[in-house]
């Protein structure tokens, strides 16, 4: 009876949590982002506290250092990325002309007037669209302003997230102790053990994957820029930071960079160099970076991670994407705990029933 009540209680709590996330997902983003930042920065505050610094002062120091580093990185990366993106938009007609010439070369024995007409129209439409880019930008901004909710979400993400992260970081240990005090006493040891396992998985995975993403983004950006690929910085950053989703970042960057290299360069050598850069990046990631920085002890299978990100995005939007990793870690820990309990239960260890052999039939008299 007690187990049934516990199952009902946790089932209702889980259902209510899912419903709250579903109906409040439009406003949860700054709170989820603030919680993620506080979780990431909490170990730094703990180290300062061990050196005798008060929690409030440690929170101020860590928050200011994190903000300065973030602003420095954004100040170095965003201007160059904007310049390269604008240059890419301006060169789209040139790329289409190059594609048109390539189609002509490959279709010498085939009537290519159909393809020529399509590419010519595409190049003309792109040229006109590039000239109207500023107007479209102002129109989009006006739509955001008139939409109201989107503007509120953007402003809340920019201004509310730092406030939420600061107060959560300051009171993190107190919140953990308070939640621990709310746990049912009978199940508290088990819940604490599962929470510790989840925390270890999340901490190792977040730190390891973030380090891998930074290394890959730096490698792809520098290498593609040295090869001479236009917009190499932007594509390298996209490839690197999308690597937190297994295989997606490398595949996206490979398609974009190789396609752009085919349009930009006249010879195939730079195209092979660009493809080789992604080959080297994948070999380094699979054989050195991920095993060394993430490791197998994390326990998150790539298929589970991909499914979690896609399911979270479909169900709850960008908030779901941010919640996907913790949810996958929790489900993985609960799944292993349930499997361990099952393997040690009588249901698994029950011996098969002996089959009664039918009596031998004697000779018919």
Image (tube, grey):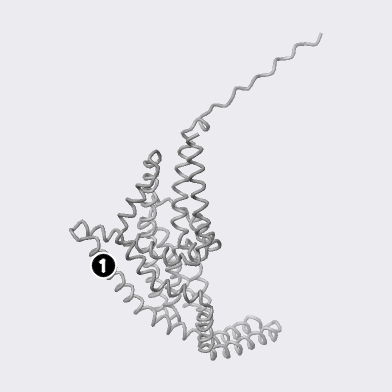
5 w.r.t. 233: above or below: above
Kindly indicate the quadrant of the structure image that contains residue 355.
top right
User: Where residue 103 appears, x then y in whole percent?
Assistant: 62, 82
- For image coordinates 65% across by 19% down, the residue present is 356
Residue, disc 1 = 60
Task: Return the x and y of residue 205 as percentages of the image width and height.
Answer: 39, 57
The quadrant of the rendering that contains the C terminus is top right
Q: Residue sitting at 50 percent across and 34 percent down? A: 1
* Residue at the image point whose x is 38% and y is 40% from the top: 185
Callout 1: helix, strand or loop?
helix
In the image, 51 versus 80, the foreground residue is 51
The image position of residue 254, as x and y in percent, is 49, 70
Q: Residue furthest right?
A: 365
Q: Is residue 15 left or right of residue 363?
A: left
x, y percentage for residue 151?
A: 48, 77
Badge count: 1
Q: Classify 10 Å Cα crowding around label 1: few (below 14), some (14-19), many (20 and above).
A: some
Residue 310, placed above or below residue 95: above
For residue 173, which quarter of the picture?
A: bottom left
Residue at the top extreme? 365
Frontmost residue, 234 versus 258? 234
């Amino acid at each position: 009876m007690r187990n049934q009540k516990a199952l009902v209680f946790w089932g209702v709590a889980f259902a209510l949590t899912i419903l709250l996330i579903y109906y409040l997902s439009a406003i949860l983003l700054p709170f989820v982002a603030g919680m993620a930042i506080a979780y990431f920065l909490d170990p730094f505050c703990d180290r300062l506290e061990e050196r005798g610094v008060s929690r409030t002062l440690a929170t101020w120091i860590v928050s200011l250092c994190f903000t300065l580093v973030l602003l420095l990185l954004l100040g170095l990366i965003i201007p160059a990325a904007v310049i390269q993106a604008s240059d890419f938009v301006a060169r789209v007609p040139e790329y289409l002309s190059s594609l048109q010439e390539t189609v002509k070369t490959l279709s010498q024995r085939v009537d290519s007037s159909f393809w020529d007409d399509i590419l010519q129209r595409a190049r003309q439409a792109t040229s006109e669209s590039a000239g109207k880019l500023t107007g479209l930008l102002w129109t989009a901004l006006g739509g955001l302003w008139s939409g109201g909710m989107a503007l509120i979400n953007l402003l809340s993400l920019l201004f509310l997230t730092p406030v939420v992260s600061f107060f959560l970081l300051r009171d993190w240990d107190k919140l953990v102790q308070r939640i621990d005090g709310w746990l049912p006493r009978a199940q508290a040891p088990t819940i604490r053990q599962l929470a510790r396992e989840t925390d270890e998985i999340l901490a190792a995975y977040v730190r390891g994957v973030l380090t891998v993403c930074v290394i890959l983004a730096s490698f792809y950006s520098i290498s593609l820029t040295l090869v001479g690929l236009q917009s190499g910085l932007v594509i390298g950053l996209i490839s690197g930071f999308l690597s937190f989703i297994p295989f997606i970042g490398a595949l996206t960057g490979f398609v974009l960079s190789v396609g752009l290299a085919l349009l930009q360069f006249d010879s195939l050598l730079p195209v092979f160099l660009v493809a080789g850069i992604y080959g080297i990046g994948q070999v380094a990631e699979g054989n050195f970076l991920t095993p060394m920085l993430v490791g197998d002890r994390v326990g998150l299978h790539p298929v589970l991670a991909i499914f979690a990100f896609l399911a979270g995005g479909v169900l709850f939007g960008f908030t779901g994407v941010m919640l996907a990793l913790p949810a996958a870690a929790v489900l993985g820990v609960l799944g292993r705990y349930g499997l361990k309990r099952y393997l040690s239960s009588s249901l698994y260890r029950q011996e098969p029933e002996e089959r009664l052999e039918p009596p031998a039939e004697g000779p018919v008299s």
